[in-house]
Structures are given as structure tokens and as C-alpha cells.
Image (spheres, rainbow, N blue to C red):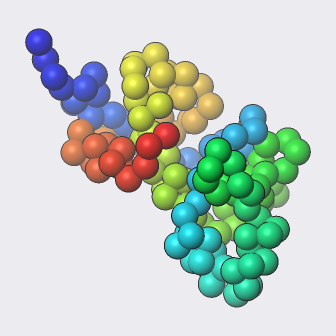
């Protein structure tokens, strides 16, 4: 029995900067205290303001807030980009290499439907995918 994941030969992915991963159905973007602090420093705002205006408690953790349409509070719809990109949370940095997305070829295909960077661009090795997967549990 082979213990290698279905993607053991690697996967192709290159971010197209489309912003689709920052929009859509409501959900959660988990943030740590360190990430909240980094956002506050980057925006030159008090950490309390960031907590109050841009985060919410959810499932015993902290998540970024979102607009009524599901877009991340830090998503710029005109530029289709992240306004805190240099300090974006690890959840965002590791997209699309989340356990839920690479669980099966079918999960990967479902994710590809919303992410035009999946299946094109750079080859991402098994080792890099595993590194990304180890950073978060989504």
C-alpha cells in the first residue's frame, strides 16, 4: 500500500492575483495575536482598533471580519487585491495548499473552479506542499 499522497508528484499553481480567494461565501480567516499585532503595525493603528473593527470571535478563535457579501474586510474590490498583503495571515499565505483543498483530487478540482491559478504556472513540489500544509490546519 502506497503511503504517498495523491499529489506526490507535485501540483501546478501560480497566483493570478484574481482575488477570488478573498471573496465569496462567508467563512473564516483565522488570525493569531501576532498576526493582529502585525496588521496593526502595518496600518499604523492601535491593536485595540484592529481587534474591534477588523476581527471577531468565532469557534473559540479569532477571525477577520468580512463584508455582508463575504469579502474579506481587507479586500479592495476595485484593485482586486489585499490591502494588508505584506502582513496577510498565514491562512492567506498558504492558499491553496490547505488540507481541505488537497484532501482528494476531487477537492482540488472543486477548488480549481474558483481559483484560476490552480493547474497552471509553476510546479510546486511535494516537499513545498507539505511545508505549506504544516503551517495551518484548514
16 left or right of 51 in image? left
Residue 40, given in percent of the width and then of the height, sits at 66, 79
Residue 8 can be seen, yes or no: yes
**Vertically, is 21 above or below 93?**
above
Q: Nearer the viewer, residue 65 or 71?
A: 65
Identified at 46% across, 25% down, the residue is 108
Identified at 49% across, 58% down, the residue is 90
Q: Quadrant of residue 130?
A: top left
Extreme residue toward the left, this view? 1
Identified at 43% across, 49% down, the residue is 136
Residue 98, given in percent of the width and then of the height, sits at 45, 39
**Vertically, is 76 above or below 3?**
below
**Vertically, is 93 above or below 7?**
below
In what quadrant of the picture does the N terminus appear?
top left
Q: Nearer the viewer, residue 43 or 138?
A: 138
Residue 30, given in percent of the width and then of the height, sits at 59, 53
Identified at 88% across, 45% down, the residue is 68
47 left or right of 107 in image? right
Amino acid at each position: 500500500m502506497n503511503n504517498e499522497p495523491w499529489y506526490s508528484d507535485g501540483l501546478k499553481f501560480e497566483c493570478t492575483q484574481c482575488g477570488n480567494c478573498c471573496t465569496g461565501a462567508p467563512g473564516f480567516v483565522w488570525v493569531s495575536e501576532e498576526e493582529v499585532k502585525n496588521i496593526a503595525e502595518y496600518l499604523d493603528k492601535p491593536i485595540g482598533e484592529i481587534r474591534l473593527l477588523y476581527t471577531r470571535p468565532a469557534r473559540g478563535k479569532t477571525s477577520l471580519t468580512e463584508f455582508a457579501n463575504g469579502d474579506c474586510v481587507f479586500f479592495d474590490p476595485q484593485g482586486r487585491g489585499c490591502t494588508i498583503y505584506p502582513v496577510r495571515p498565514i491562512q492567506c499565505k498558504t492558499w491553496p495548499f490547505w488540507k481541505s483543498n488537497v484532501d482528494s483530487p476531487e477537492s482540488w478540482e472543486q477548488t480549481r473552479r474558483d481559483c484560476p491559478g490552480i493547474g497552471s504556472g509553476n510546479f510546486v513540489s511535494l516537499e513545498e506542499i507539505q511545508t505549506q500544509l504544516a503551517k495551518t490546519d484548514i
